[in-house]
Image (spheres, rainbow, N blue to C red):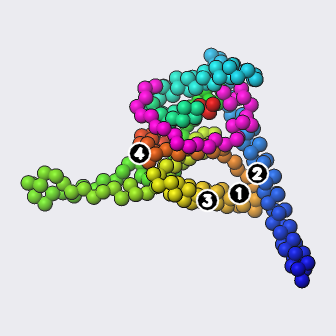
């Protein structure tokens, strides 16, 4: 009886294992395709500006640090041409800074972050080229409104010089927002609650929603015999106040500067 049950169990698991293996292979192909698209997108910039520095492929850590710093400051110079607020994310310093014309207007401490291994697969020279320009946001999704809603109630009498204000009810929502930047990069921002138990709960719930949406999209693509899509992601955790300030300060087509190492 036990052998029969084991045989049925193995026969049932075999198709599931096969599907999982096929999905894993298709996902690897999607990642490689995303790497190729990223490298093609930024390699085309080489011929646009003859004054650009030529980045070198080397194992010299000191020289790589110089190239990384050059890319970082060049991106800031490019972003300074914009009149809007620019978001600068410096992972070595664990800071997220808002800049206007190169002037710092707000600095937030990054509590935790996670960067996709996607960036380690890119040719070093092309990665520095990409980081020497700001990334432009194409889409935003958030759990809070861009502008907080404050409802003012007119005074009943002219002697009532202080009107009643209904508190912003959206302030109780966990702060979460997603910035999708060209060419297909996702930057997730989460608040870091004071209650440590809420960190895992809110984070797990949001991650499950995101992963479920990605999985459903992948399944639809497989059913319709289309290639899977892959977008590299960066995840940051900030305190609630800083997360709200950053989201409400940046424009819809904000520029993002990254320093990965």
- Please rate how many residues cluster around mark 2, counting C-alpha atoms within 10 Å: few if below 14, some from 14 to 19, many from 20: some
**Label 3 vs 2, first from the N-terminus:** 2
What is the CA distance from the residue labelled 4 to the residue labelled 3?
A: 25 Å
Q: Which residue is mark 4?
A: 241
What percent of the width, then of the height, locates residue 191? 48, 49
In front here: 47 or 259? 259
Q: Find disc 2 in the rendering and name its residue.
A: 27
Residues tagged 2 and 1 counted as in contact (Cβ below 8 A): yes
* Residue 182 placement (x, y as % from top left): 60, 39
Q: Determine whether 35 is above or below 205 in the image.
A: above
As drawn, which residue projects farthest toward the bottom? 1
Q: Nearer the viewer, mark 3 or mark 2?
A: 3
Tags 3 and 2 in contact by the CB under 8 Å rule? no
Q: Mark 1 Cα within 10 Å, few/some/many (few <14, many 20+)? A: many
- Residue bearing mark 3: 208
Residue 90 magenta: no
**Which residue appears farthest toward the left when viewing the image?**
159
| Gap in angstroms between the C-alphas marked 3 and 2 | 18 Å
Residue marked by disc 1: 218
Residues under labels 1 and 4: Cα distance?
35 Å
Left or right: 74 as drawn, with respect to 25:
left
Whole-angstrom CA distance, mark 4 to mark 2, is 37 Å
Residue 91 lies in quadrant: top right
């Amino acid at each position: 009886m036990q052998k029969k049950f084991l045989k049925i169990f193995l026969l049932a698991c075999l198709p599931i294992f096969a599907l999982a293996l096929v999905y894993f292979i298709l996902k690897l192909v999607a990642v490689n395709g995303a790497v190729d698209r990223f490298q093609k997108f930024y390699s085309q910039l080489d011929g646009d500006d003859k004054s650009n520095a030529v980045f070198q492929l080397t194992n010299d850590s000191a020289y790589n640090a110089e190239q990384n710093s050059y890319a970082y400051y060049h991106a800031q110079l490019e972003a300074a041409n914009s009149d809007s607020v620019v978001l600068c994310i410096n992972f070595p310093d664990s800071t997220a800074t808002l800049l206007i014309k190169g002037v710092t207007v707000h600095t937030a401490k990054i509590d935790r972050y996670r960067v996709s291994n996607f960036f380690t697969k890119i040719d070093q020279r092309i990665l520095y080229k990409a980081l020497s320009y700001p990334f432009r946001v194409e889409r935003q999704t958030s759990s809070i409104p861009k502008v907080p809603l404050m409802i003012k109630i007119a005074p009943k009498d002219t002697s009532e010089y202080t009107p009643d204000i209904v508190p912003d009810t959206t302030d109780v929502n966990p702060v979460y927002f997603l910035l999708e930047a060209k060419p297909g990069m996702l930057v997730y921002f989460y608040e870091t609650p004071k209650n440590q138990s809420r960190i895992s709960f809110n984070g797990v719930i949001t991650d499950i929603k995101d992963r479920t949406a990605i999985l459903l999209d992948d399944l639809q693509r497989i059913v319709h015999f289309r290639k899977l899509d892959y977008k590299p992601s960066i995840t940051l955790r900030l305190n609630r106040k800083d997360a709200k300030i950053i989201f409400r300060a940046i424009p819809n087509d904000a520029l993002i500067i990254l320093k990965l190492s």
